Image (cartoon, rainbow, N blue to C red):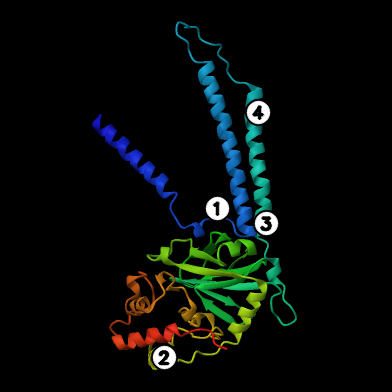
């Protein structure tokens, strides 16, 4: 008896814990607050299915309670009710109703699947060989993201910049293991594979972007290694005009010239230890295979270090010395034993000055 009670308490504790934890999380990572056409359609489909399932549950519950009360055996009444074996009308009815409900779910689902999967627009190119639509190549690596704007010759890392009220087409792939590209508030997710390119489109509503401070957050939605939960990126949603200005700034960006003596020393350290992996200008002309590490052109403008740490000089130095402490499994080597504290300080100063200059 005590054993049963103990199991009952354990089950109740786990159930309550799951109920409480299900309400935890970041509001900006919620798929229940759609900020674009794709997310809105997916949300509407989900709610439509939930309402239909809720309707079925209520009908079944009403029938169950009605039968339980009306046809229960009464005290002193020992007569058995008439035994009925089969009822063709009922059997036809409870076959037709589920079929109708499935059709009500299937029609909008299939319609939206084909609409949301239509990427023919990204195949059209003008006489210059550039896409008519805005296309972004997304490449996922352990544990960072690269965003390439092929028609503009611009490459960024960890921050995706897109215009609002405009369809943006994505070509998604992975460079090492399977990942998944997901911006919960905007729509998704789409797998990033190593052996093929997956395509889809997203559109962010300008009003929703303004309500969110023009920043959304993306994540890897496929278990890819020990730091899977730390594989985040930022999405900056701006107006179409601001996006064109941003593209112009990135295309004309020059290599940062260090402003202080410490930063100049840091640049020397960077050229000796880091330049073989990292680029410091958005116009990275190296082939994709050679881009093995994040582009650091806008590192001084970022809000996070490695996508997870608060942006300050101390965290930059900590990351340089021992990145695996913060992102287990990262491919970036530790420089704590290779560089002196003075060199690490200078390197951090230089990195903080990496901003787009004109």
Numbered disc 3: secondary structure: helix
Measured along the vertical axis of the image, is residue 152 above or below residue 62? below
Q: Position of residue 150 (x, y in %)?
A: 62, 78
The residue lying toward the viewer, choosing from 321 and 181, is 321
Q: CA distance from mark 2 to mark 4?
A: 77 Å
Mark closer to the observer (4, 1): 1
| Quadrant the C terminus occupies | bottom right
The residue tagged 2 is: 267
First along the sequence among labels 3 and 2: 3
First along the sequence among labels 1 and 2: 1
The residue lying toward the viewer, choosing from 193 and 201, is 201
Q: Position of residue 90 (x, y in %)?
A: 63, 24
- Specify the quadrant of the image occupied by residue 127: bottom right
Measured along the vertical axis of the image, is residue 166 above or below residue 313? above
The residue tagged 1 is: 32
Q: CA distance from mark 4 to mark 3?
A: 32 Å
First along the sequence among labels 1 and 3: 1
Numbered disc 1: secondary structure: loop
Q: Position of residue 298 (x, y in %)?
A: 50, 80
Can I make out residue 203 in this image? Answer: no
- Badge 1 crowding class, 10 Å Cα cut-off, few under 14, some 14 to 19, many 20 or more, is some
Mark closer to the observer (2, 4): 2
Q: CA distance from mark 3 to mark 2?
A: 50 Å
Q: Position of residue 55 (x, y in %)?
A: 59, 35
- Specify the quadrant of the image occupied by residue 306: bottom left
Direction from residue 190 to residue 124 in the image, left or right: right
Mark closer to the observer (1, 3): 1
The residue tagged 4 is: 93
Q: CA distance from mark 1 to mark 3?
A: 22 Å
First along the sequence among labels 4 and 1: 1
The residue tagged 3 is: 114
Badge 4 vs badge 1, beta-carbon distance below 8 Å: no
């Amino acid at each position: 008896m005590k054993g049963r009670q103990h199991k009952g308490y354990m089950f109740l504790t786990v159930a309550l814990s799951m109920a409480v934890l299900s309400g935890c999380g970041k509001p900006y990572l919620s798929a229940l607050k759609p900020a674009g056409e794709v997310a809105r359609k997916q949300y509407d489909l989900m709610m439509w299915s939930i309402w239909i399932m809720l309707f079925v549950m209520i009908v079944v519950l009403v029938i169950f309670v009605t039968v339980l009360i009306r046809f229960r055996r009464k005290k002193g009444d020992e007569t058995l009710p008439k035994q009925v074996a089969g009822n063709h009308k009922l059997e036809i009815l409870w076959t037709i109703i589920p079929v109708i409900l499935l059709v009500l779910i299937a029609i909008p689902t299939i319609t939206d699947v084909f609409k949301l999967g239509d990427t023919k627009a990204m195949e059209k190119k003008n006489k210059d060989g550039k896409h008519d639509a805005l296309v972004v190549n997304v490449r996922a690596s352990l544990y960072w993201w690269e965003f390439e704007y092929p028609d503009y010759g611009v490459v960024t890392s960890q921050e995706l910049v897109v215009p609002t009220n405009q369809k943006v087409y994505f070509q998604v792939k992975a460079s090492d293991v399977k990942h998944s590209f997901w911006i919960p508030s905007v729509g998704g997710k789409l797998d990033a594979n190593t052996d093929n390119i997956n395509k889809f489109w997203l559109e962010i509503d300008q009003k929703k972007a303004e309500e969110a401070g023009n920043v959304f957050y993306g994540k890897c939605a496929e278990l890819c290694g020990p730091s899977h939960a730390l594989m985040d990126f930022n999405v900056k949603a701006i107006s179409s005009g601001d996006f064109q200005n941003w593209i112009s700034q990135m295309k004309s960006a020059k290599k940062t010239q260090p402003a202080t003596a410490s930063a100049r020393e840091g640049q020397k350290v960077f050229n000796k230890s880091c330049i073989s992996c990292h680029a410091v200008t958005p116009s990275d002309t190296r082939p994709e295979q050679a881009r093995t590490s994040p582009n650091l052109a806008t590192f001084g403008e970022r809000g996070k270090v490695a996508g997870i740490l608060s942006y300050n000089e101390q965290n930059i130095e900590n990351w340089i010395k021992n990145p695996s402490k913060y992102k287990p499994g990262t491919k970036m080597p530790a420089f704590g034993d290779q560089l002196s504290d003075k060199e690490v300080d200078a390197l951090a100063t230089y990195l903080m000055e990496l901003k787009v200059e004109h």
